[in-house]
Image: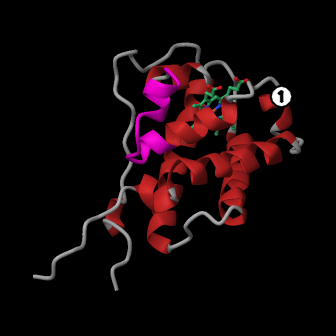
Amino acid sequence: MEERKAIPTLYDWAGGKDALEKLTKLFYEKVLKDDLLYPVFKNMSTDHSNHVAHFIAEVFGGPKLYSEEDKGSHAIMITHHLGKMLDEPKRKRWMDLLLESADETGLASDPEFRSALVGYLEWGSRIAVINSNTNDNPVNENEPMPKWGWGETKGPYQG
Ligand code: HEM
């Protein structure tokens, strides 16, 4: 049977911390210029963009940038969404602008990586909408950060 080469984490394949911070920086610039999303994010902190990059970095198998460096946790991330009353049009715009930013910042665009990225963002953004329509955090403070991998493609294409 043919041996597969070592599978990189999604974090490494994406280009690490710098690539993810660049992605969210452009994304929140777009968000603040967007009529639908501006009111939702107008009070966000100056750290917001990096915190989201660090959260994704950690979920994608990178270092504990969110849970240790930023002193966050899965439960704390969810707390930020509680009561925000998000809906499908806002979620969709959020997805569109994030994927547009991925293309414009030159994030890895191979089919395997993008399938994992979109899968994670669809999952996470739909959960964010659900949690934004309640004030009760369903996640316990001790629960681990989510982890996301390559999914069905099992890794980058190895021609
Ligand atoms: C995979 C999906 C998502 C992830 C990983 C994520 C992650 C985060 C994180 C880490 C924070 C805390 C930032 C901080 O420390 O300042 C946050 C806050 C927030 N997120 Fe999300 N989020 C996601 C989806 C969404 C979506 C779809 C929306 C809206 C359409 C949204 C709206 C917000 C808002 C309004 C806040 C609070 C902003 C404020 O502090 O004023 N999030 N999110």
For label 1, the SS is: loop
Q: Quadrant of the N terminus?
A: bottom left
Can you identify the residue that label 1 sits on? 42
Q: Please give the name of the residue rendered at 74% of the width and 28% of the height, measured from the top-left corner.
A: 46
Image position, residue 50 (x, y; %) = 63, 36
Locate residue 91 relative to residue 113 in the image: left or right: right
**Placement of 45 over or under 50, stated as above or below:** above
Ligand 1 within 8 Å, label 1 CB: yes
Q: Where on the image, by quarter, is ligand 1? A: top right
> In the rendered structure, which amino acid carries the disc numbered 1?
Lys
Quarter of the figure with residue 44:
top right
Q: Please give the name of the residue rendered at 85% of the width and 35% of the height, measured from the top-left corner.
A: 38
Image position, residue 120 (x, y; %) = 48, 50
Residue 126 visible at all? no
Image position, residue 146 (x, y; %) = 39, 36
Of 16 and 78, nearer the camera is: 16
Instruction: Residue 153: say if magenta.
Output: no
Q: Please give the name of the residue rendered at 61% of the width and 20% of the height, measured from the top-left corner.
A: 82
Locate residue 12 relative to residue 151 in the image: left or right: right
Instruction: Residue 70: say if magenta.
Output: yes
Image position, residue 47 (x, y; %) = 68, 28
Residue 52 visible at all? yes
Mark 1: give few (<14), some (14-19) or many (20+) Cα within 10 Å. few
Magenta-colored span: 57-71
Quarter of the figure with residue 37:
top right
**Placement of 149 over or under 88, stated as above or below:** below
Q: Quadrant of the C terminus?
A: bottom left
